[in-house]
Amino acid sequence: MTQTSTLTWTPVCLLDRLEPDRGVAALVDGVQVALFRTTDGLFAIDNRDPVSEAYVLSRGIVGSRGGVPTVASPLHKQVYDLRSGDCLDLPEVTVRRHDVRCRDGLVEVRLRQEG
């Protein structure tokens, strides 16, 4: 599966509205995105858990595994690498990752499309 980025950065919220090590859901161009602010940086993935098919990843448990920033699904506890979207428990499962940045205190997301 190849991913390509859209060209548009969408403003989502002020950085100080994101609590460290907590997720928040945002609607970006019609896509539910889970945003995370950790000591490792900002991360954005689809909010849809590919195992349960529920939109819950923003409510997952933020942590790390072997130095990798992660989120564990609140439903079935599969752990996802926030940098890549790969599931660390089920190698064939991934969640789509999006580009995220902070400019002048404003968090922006650029969706990645599956190609």
Image (spheres, rainbow, N blue to C red):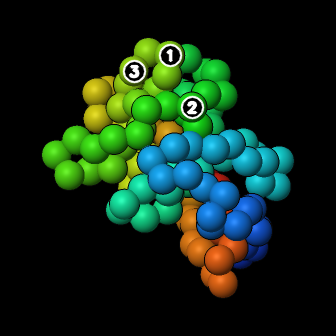
Residue 24 visible, this orientation:
yes
- Residue found 50% across the figure and 16% down from its top: 75
- The amino acid type found where label 2 is placed reads Arg
Q: As displayed, is residue 86 above or below residue 29?
A: above
- Residue found 56% across the figure and 65% down from its top: 99
**Picture coordinates of residue 62, whole percent (x, y):** 41, 40
Viewer-proximal residue among 17 and 12: 17
Residue closest to the far bottom: 104
Q: Is residue 4 left or right of residue 81?
A: right
Q: CA distance from mark 2 to mark 1?
A: 10 Å
Indicate which disc, 2 or 1, sits on the residue closer to the N terminus. 2
Viewer-proximal residue among 1 and 113: 113
Numbered disc 1: secondary structure: loop
Residue 4 visible, this orientation:
no
Q: As displayed, is residue 31 above or below residue 40?
A: above
Numbered disc 2: secondary structure: helix
Number of the label disc, if any, that sits on residue 77: 3
